[in-house]
Image (spheres, helix red, strand yellow):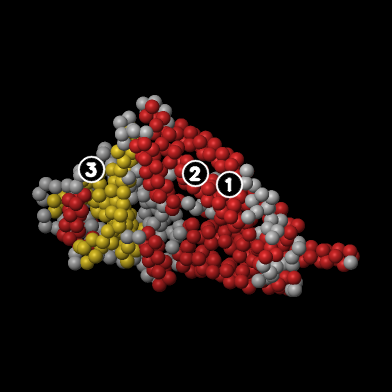
Amino acid sequence: MQTHTTKQGLGIERVWWHFGVLAGLVIILLGLLYHNTVISMVQTWWSSGTYAHGMVILPISAYLVWSCRRDLVKVHPIPHWHGIAVLAILVFFWLAGHAANVLLLQQLAFMAMVPSVVWALLGPSVLRRLWFPLAYLVFAVPWGAGFVPFLQNFTAAFSVKLLEVTRIPVYWEGHMISIPTGDFRVAEACSGVRYLIASIALGSLYAYIMYRTTLRRVLFVAASAVVPILANGLRAYGIIMLAHISEMRLATGVDHIIYGWVFFSFVILLLFALGWFWREDWARCEQDLSKGPRSDFSRRKGRPWMAWMACSLVFCIAAAGPAGAAWLARDLSSPDTQVVLPQAASGWKGPIKPANSWDPSFRGADQTLHQLYTESNPGRPIHVLVIHYEQERQGRELVSHMNSLRGEAWSFLGQQRRWIEVAQAGLPVREHRLRGPRGENRLVWSWYDIGGRLANHAWKAKLFGVLNKVLGSAEDATLVAVASDYESSLGEAREQLRTFLEDHSRIVEPRGVIDLQRNHADALQSGS
């Protein structure tokens, strides 16, 4: 009996050597096929302090896989077609992300391909034993930027509430907080997103190591998400109070960032110390797999020819992503396009070059045009801003969290989506309220024009871009914005914008500010 067991163990180890090496080679080839996606993640880790933790996620995951090696040799690896089907779905999502220039979707889809390859080549029994090391790879993806607006709003509201409790006079509008000592702005860097992501990543690893039951793990990860959000609000309140007590001598520069990291480190250590009291037996690998079937590997064993066949199929499916991206990258741009604005209608003057500054930031835009229209009777001028991309590419897309309609010098006060009845039609707009460096208030209506399709949602703009690529339509993308300054009455500013658009209906037409011929562009842009 002992001899039989030894031979069986040697047989399993020989099978694992064959399947394991092939699986490792396929994952390396996957990285080479999608090297642009891998490079984009590495660049983000290196350049952004928010996602610097991504550099240690792969080594941690690899170590966790290695620590499970004794449990893995208890099962026979065998290819499974469910993993191949999931891989095909992920390749489709990656291709959709590429077509829409959504880097996050590409990175998530690529990272999810790794466990799908393990599933396809080694089977569900292996996948169950490696579920956490493979799932932990999600923290290597630079995600979380979408939480910034919510975190900014929560941090501002939380700190204002604490200021009111401590009887500090406060005025709050959007991300601006004013107290008698000075003004404060909850910037994107103060949202606490870096603390949140780092806390969830550390908390997930801690919960996996310290606890065995699912409930305790889920509760600790939830605490790892909630605690840093509350702590960041408390940190913002503390910084405002410190600046207030010191009469704006402390916590107004880079030192408040240092205070933030010191405070965050203390909070995380306290969270882990509390979690220690409820620790269970160490659980690097799942041992209680007897609740469900151990898969059909106990009855069937993987053969070398199965591994080679599965590897070939996996490689062909994975290669379909870059091949489809090359097809979508064909040039569909309209090189003879020019941003133009109509001449002023009766009762208006313009377009003319503005004297004051407004510096929206849009990376890689092909054309940017900012002009003013003024009423013949004295009134506030109307700003018209057009951002145009002849053909979007990665790093040069209209809809991106890196782009900003307000720019660096302006502060964000609030936004909403509106449906404007203008020119006997409906116009979907995003309404922004901004505050300038000199205290001026500006109301902005903006919308996307994606190859002639109008939208006021970022996801709709992305969807229209994908449809245009797939259908072979023009791929130009444009943001059109009209703005009016105001003192106190938003209603007057809205009515003035609506009247301007009624009188210049060409601006609200699909591709109305794009001249496809360039045959009379100079005449239309007189005064620019």
Q: Could you tell me how far apart the alpha carbons at marks 1 and 3 are, in whole angstroms?
A: 50 Å
Q: Quadrant of the N terminus?
A: bottom right
The residue that appears at 58% across and 71% down in the rendered structure is 85
Circle 2 is placed at which residue position? Answer: 228
Q: Is residue 392 left or right of residue 127?
A: left
The answer to which image quadrant residue 75 occupies is bottom right
Q: Earlier in the sequence, mark 2 or mark 3?
A: 2
Earlier residue among tags 2 and 1? 1
Query: Residue 7: where, in percent of width, then height?
Result: 86, 66
Q: Label 2's element? A: helix
Residue under label 1: 202
Kind of residue at badge 1: Leu
Front one among 70 and 457? 70
Q: Residue 83: image x %, image y %?
A: 61, 69
- Residue ID at (38%, 38%): 162
- Which mark, by number, is residue 355? 3
- Give the quadrant of residue 297: bottom right
Q: Is residue 322 left or right of residue 175?
A: right
Crowd tier of the residue under label 2, counting other residues whose Cα lies within 10 Å: few below 14, some 14–19, many 20 or above = many
Circle 1 residues within 10 Å: few <14, some 14–19, many ≥20: some
Amino acid type shown at disc 2: Pro
Image label count: 3
Circle 1 — which element? helix
Does any portion of residue 372 appear in the rendered image?
Answer: no
